[in-house]
Amino acid sequence: MSFLDFCIYWAAFVLGMIILANFVAPGKLGYADNLARVEPFFGEVFRVHCAYTVLTMLGMLLVCVFYHDEVKSGGGMGLGFNVFMAVFWGSRVVVQVFFYDVDIKKKYPVYNVIFLTAFSYLAVLFTYLVLIK
């Protein structure tokens, strides 16, 4: 297995860890208490968006595992996937750094660093895969 193969499989692992974190975050961040203060419709929209985000990341993970060769080759659909991933995770780094409340990041500094590292890894890997094509 080449280093690039390992990096793509590692991306699947990182995606899996981000998915798992989405099941821990609601309790840690008090989603239920916060959502109780908004109109029910907005709580529903939030939950649906969370579910679709997790489903999207599961799809990303599955592509990295089952379509590994296409992702690595960067041809055709592999290129499209890599561009999507580079933009998706690159923009997620920007959100993590510039959008999220500084007080929350200070309250959970370890989580902030872990997530920023994970998002950056994915952004750099898939940007690299786009650029080497």
Image (cartoon, rainbow, N blue to C red):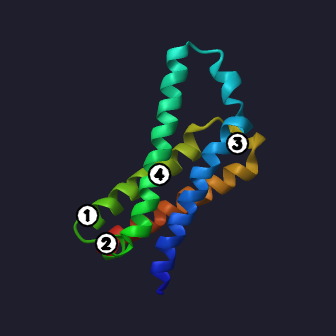
Q: Residue furthest left?
A: 76
Name the outermost residue toward the bottom.
1
Q: Earlier in the sequence, mark 3 or mark 1?
A: 1
Residue depth check, mark 3 versus mark 1: number of the one nearer the observer: 1
Label drawn at residue 98: none
Q: Which residue is mark 1?
A: 77
Q: CA distance from mark 4 to mark 1?
A: 17 Å
Amino acid type, callout 4: Met
User: In the image, what residue occupies the spot 65% across and 15% down?
Assistant: 37
Q: Residues within 10 Å of mark 4 (few under 14, many from 20)?
A: some
Check the image and report above or below for 133 versus 63. below
- Residue at 64 percent of width and 49 percent of height: 21
- Relative vertical location of residue 129 with respect to residue 93 in this rendering, above or below: below
The answer to whether mark 3 and mark 4 are in CB contact below 8 A is no
Residue type, mark 3 in image:
Lys
- Report the residue marked by disc 4: 57
Residue 70 as seen in the image, left or right of residue 7: left
Q: Residue at x 62, y 53 (%)?
A: 115
The mark found on residue 105 in the picture is 3
Q: How many numbered discs?
A: 4
Cα separation, mark 2 vs mark 4, equals: 18 Å
Residue lying furthest top: 39
Residue 103: tell me if it is visible. no
Residue type highlighted by circle 2:
Glu
